[in-house]
Image (cartoon, helix red, strand yellow):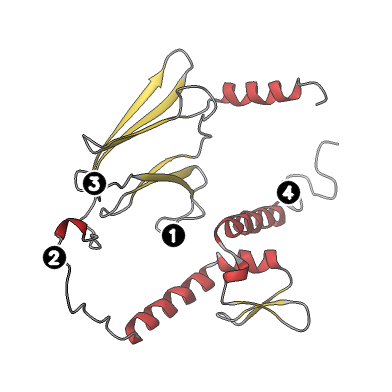
Amino acid sequence: MDREWGSKPGSGGAASAQNEAIDRKERLRRLALETIDLAKDPYFMRNHLGSYECKLCLTLHKNEGNYLAHTQGKRHQTNLAQRAAREAKEAPPAPQPLHPQKRKGNVRKSVKIGRPGYRVTKQFDEESKQRSLLFQIEYPEIEFNAKPRHRFMSSYEQRVQSVDKRYQYLLFAAEPYDTIAFRVPSTEIDKTTPNKFFSNWDPDSKMFTLQIYFKTKAHEQTTTSSAANRPGV
């Protein structure tokens, strides 16, 4: 018998839906662990019964992992946004400086000036059969001595588009420009092969360059088999 124990023929596994829900909660919990410090969370509280409470949403949670998953949910995020909007509306206007600085060169730019110019080039390596992307972002008005930053974001982390696990997001940021994001395949990025993952900031031309290669299935199989053939594995 090849079907899963305890399941009916054609059911796809009795616990498949439950396992999917558990996997989703675990992904949310791991994401929260990377972004939330419970010691600094003003809404996290442990009560006298040993369970945990969210003081913002007035919800009870049996453990820290359950609370962390809750913080990534729609209810908690909506309440956070509403509270921030209310506090911003009730906050008194900020006092204006009596003696504004005269040295314009040292004044920090706080007003966003829009999106930077960019160019994205799709490439294909015939030898390795790998697809790659070359990003060239122009920051002619970047702040003095500043350098652009970039990071990858999972589809579960962003709040702009509906979740699609087939894609991830690559973000670029530099003051005073708006942060821009590109949706790219969620295929693993090749960061181990020399010259496959490259970034450079040219302060003269004010251009930030990033090149990424996506691993192929052959790459992943080779990596897995190499690990399996190591002594002691």
Residue type at mark 3?
Pro
78, above or below 130, in the image: below
Q: Which mark is residue 11?
A: 4
Element under disc 4: loop
Residue 139 occupies which quadrant of the picture? top left
Tag 1 secondary structure:
loop
Instruction: Using the numbered discs, state the Cα–Cα distance from disc 1 to disc 3 in whole angstroms.
Output: 22 Å
Residue placed under numbered mark 2 in the picture? 102
Q: Are marks 1 and 2 in contact (CB under 8 Å)?
A: no
Q: Earlier in the sequence, mark 2 or mark 3?
A: 2
Q: Name the residue that disc number 3 marks.
A: 116
Q: Earlier in the sequence, mark 1 or mark 3?
A: 3
Residue type (three-letter) at the residue carrying disc 4: Ser
Cβ atoms at labels 2 and 4 below 8 Å apart:
no
Residue type at tag 2: Lys
Compared to residue 223, the image places residue 175 above or below, namely: below
Name the residue located 59 percent from the left edge and 81 percent from the top edge: 55
Q: Position of residue 102 (x, y in %)?
A: 13, 65
